[in-house]
Amino acid sequence: MRMLFPEDTAAVDPMALYADDNRPRKGNRPWVMLNMITSVDGATDANGRSGELSNPGDKTVFAAIRAVADIILVGAETLRAEGYGPPSATSAVQATRMQRKQAPRPRLVIVSGSLDLDFSGEVFADNPPPLLFTGAKPPPERLAHAKTVAEVHTAKANASLGDNRVDFTEIIKRLGELGAGVVLAEGGPSLNGQIFSTGMADELCWSIAPLLAGGQSQRLSVGAPAVLQGLILDRVLTQDHTLFLRYLTVSGTGSRDSGNTST
């Protein structure tokens, strides 16, 4: 893999690069990353799955980004569409994470207001089980079932988005209280939109696949009021005509050479 910016380097190791980035806690909350892939024309999926856009380079960067996270945050729609399983990590990644005083692998957090989920899925057989954030009034029978396979937390509704949308400001702060230093959101677009609307996004990792998708796919962020937030381009990698962009928000302080400070 080649780095194009901030300097041109013929061969780099994404695992080492992303591990060396500084991601400090932001007061009483964790550092919040978002990682998404799109086609060149902005599609976030093809045939309903983002995996259709992926390639070997994207998988390498995806693994490197996941390796630094304490929490992987995903919405129910993405969980259903992508067939999520428990987060995994190689023995080498686990060893590096434990040196940083992180758990051997990230823990999954699922957000679902309706709890319309397949509780028999592999993701709910993990140990420890996933964390599951839902609203104050989910269907009682689904809530009872969820409590048998997940660590369930309730969060207040986001009044501006409706009773079925939980408040991500509260979720992110609660994850910080549970000890998370770095939270990685993997979508989908509706979840991204809600996080962007909180002003808490610190880092956007955006893979641009060399594909034209067409179709009716959503863009990277939808479903919440528009909030303009400035970004700073921190790094550009490339492999097989795919671009891997790392943006920081203007208020972010992460840098490539200060060391990862997740806890």
Image (cartoon, grey):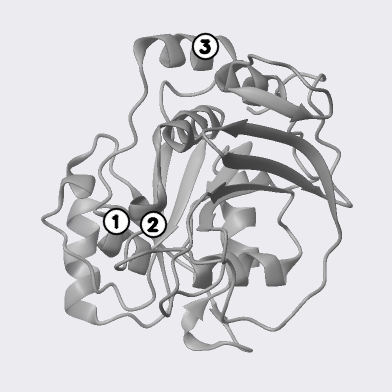
Q: Can residue 139 be seen from the camera position used here?
A: yes
Q: Is residue 96 left or right of residue 197?
A: left
Residue that appears at 70% across and 23% down: 260
Residue at (44% x, 33% y) in the render: 106
Q: Is residue 261 visible?
A: no
Q: Are marks 1 and 2 in contact (CB under 8 Å)?
A: yes
* Position of residue 258 measured from the top left corner of the image (x, y, whole percent): 82, 20
Q: In front: 65, or 117?
A: 65
Q: Earlier in the sequence, mark 1 or mark 3?
A: 1
Q: Residue furthest left?
A: 120
Identify the amino acid type marked 3. Thr
Q: Residue at x 36, y 11 (%)?
A: 91
Q: Residue 50 bears which disc, if any?
A: 2
The tag on residue 202 is: none
Q: Amino acid at mark 2?
A: Ser
Marks 2/3 in contact by CB < 8 Å: the verdict is no
Mark 1 highlights which residue?
82
Q: Nearer the viewer, residue 119 or 137?
A: 119
Amino acid at circle 1: Glu
Distance from label 1 to label 3 (Cα)? 28 Å
* Above or below for 153 versus 31: below
Q: What separation in Å lies between label 2 and label 3 (alpha carbons)?
A: 29 Å
Label 1 residue SS: helix
State the image coordinates of residue 111 (x, y, percent, origin top left): 42, 64
Q: Quadrant of the N terminus?
A: top right
Q: Quadrant of residue 262?
A: top right
Count neighbours of disc 3 (C-alpha within 10 A) and say few if under 14, some if 14 to 19, many if 20 or more.
some
Q: Quadrant of the C terminus?
A: top right
Q: Which numbered dot is residue 96?
A: 3
- Please state which of residues 191 and 10 is positioned toward the viewer in this rendering: 10
Name which of mark 2 and mark 3 comes first in the sequence. 2
Q: Nearer the viewer, mark 2 or mark 3?
A: 2
